[in-house]
Amino acid sequence: MKIANSAVCLSGRHSLVEKDESRESIQIWGRGRRLNGAAQILEQKRQDSVAVSRQAVSLMRQKLRQTENLAGREQVSLLSDEDKQKISLLEMLLSELTGKKIRFAVPAWNMSGGNAQSAGTGWGLSYESVQSHYEAETTSFQSHGIVKTADGKEISFSLNMTMSREFYSRQSVQIQAGAGAAVDPLVINYDGPSAGLTETKIQFDLDADGVLDNISFVRPGSGFLALDQNGDGVINDGRELFGPQSGDGFADLALYDVDGNQWIDENDPIFSQLQIWTRDSAGNDQLLALGVAGVGAIYLGHISTEFALKDSSNNHNGQVRSTGVFLRENGTAGTVQHVDLVV
């Protein structure tokens, strides 16, 4: 082919997107509840990274052994060796990330008046770091033209080409020490003496943060006292129970004691709206009206009755904090309990 003359147009476009994100969160709680002002969530776009070598971990453990006997660390000595290592590693990671010396102290009120076991179920901290990198590149090419050859032939052409690629990577680090965070709904034992928890977990947004939690459900004969606020026949999250938002289910319930007689009874408009959230043997949710369950009135008084609720492997699923009473229509009494569920 011999080209006599031509008119050719070439065009192209290129785009490249690179995005680095880093998200860190730390939560600290005492007696199973998150401490006010102790939880911070930092979100920012950056490219910082921290690598902890084996030598650094070894040095951390050496420092841990050197500081265990110091007076300022006496409270932490009640923790397990594994939790001590997690706390020290977390301190070191945060120090590297922030450029500041970080030291965690377990509140003294959390550790006194009990043994190591009770301390382990009363406090905790959780640290999570997520780093992600995203790339997207696209190149497009377009060409069109007219060519005349020496032998008089005319050729028109058009050509399009696109090249694209995407890449995404995500790295995360999670460290937890102490007990899992606990959230406390009220449990009414309408057909049993006290609350028990199942070993099988269910998914339910107990703390109403938009994330499903894995929690134990109450055993048959007990149920969560509930208020179906939107009337959809379903307990959607912890906002429709008593306690998960405030940390005190009895206080939440007391807000509805219109006549101030320290009882939630038929004198209070809410009584007819209260239900008991239970599950049948097949795991199907059920909502029982108080009258159907034989409940006539719920007393708002309660006292501390600390008791750990553990499974057959000694895993801590919840903690009974306090107990009150209710009266049945037949004149007999039953118990209402404030139970912290580990989430």
Image: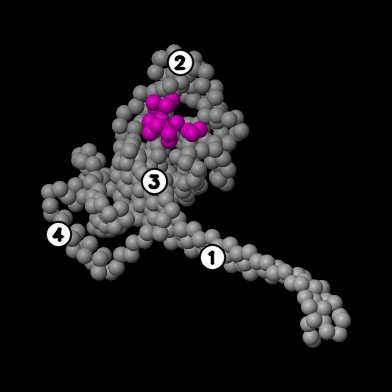
Q: Amino acid at mark 2?
A: Val
**Mark 2 or mark 4: which comes first in sequence?**
4
Q: Is residue 315 visible?
A: no
Which quarter of the figure has residue 326? top left
Measure the alpha-carbon separation of dots 2 and 4.
59 Å
Q: Nearer the viewer, mark 1 or mark 4?
A: 1
> Where is mark 2, residue-wise?
258
Name the kind of residue labelled 4 in the image. Answer: Gln
- Against 258, residue 178 (above or below) is below
Q: Which residue is mark 4?
A: 66
Residue 44 visible somewhere in the drawing: yes
Mark 1 or 4 closer to N-term? 4
Q: Which residues are magenta?
A: 239-253
Question: Dot 2 surroundings within 10 Å: few (below 14), some, or many (20 or more)?
Answer: some
- Identify the residue under disc 1: 167
Q: Earlier in the sequence, mark 4 or mark 3?
A: 3
| Position above or below: 210 against 300 | below
Q: CA distance from mark 2 to mark 1?
A: 60 Å
SS label for mark 3: strand
- The first of marks 3 and 1 along the sequence is 3
Three-letter code for the amino acid on which mark 1 is drawn: Phe
- Mark 1 to mark 4: distance in Å? 45 Å
Q: Residues within 10 Å of mark 3 (few under 14, many from 20)?
A: few
Q: Position of residue 73 (x, y in %)?
A: 17, 50
User: Residue placed at 18% from the left, 63% from the top?
Assistant: 62
Q: Residue at x 27, y 54 (%)?
A: 99
Alpha-carbon span between mark 4 and mark 3:
32 Å
Give the farthest residue toward the right: 152
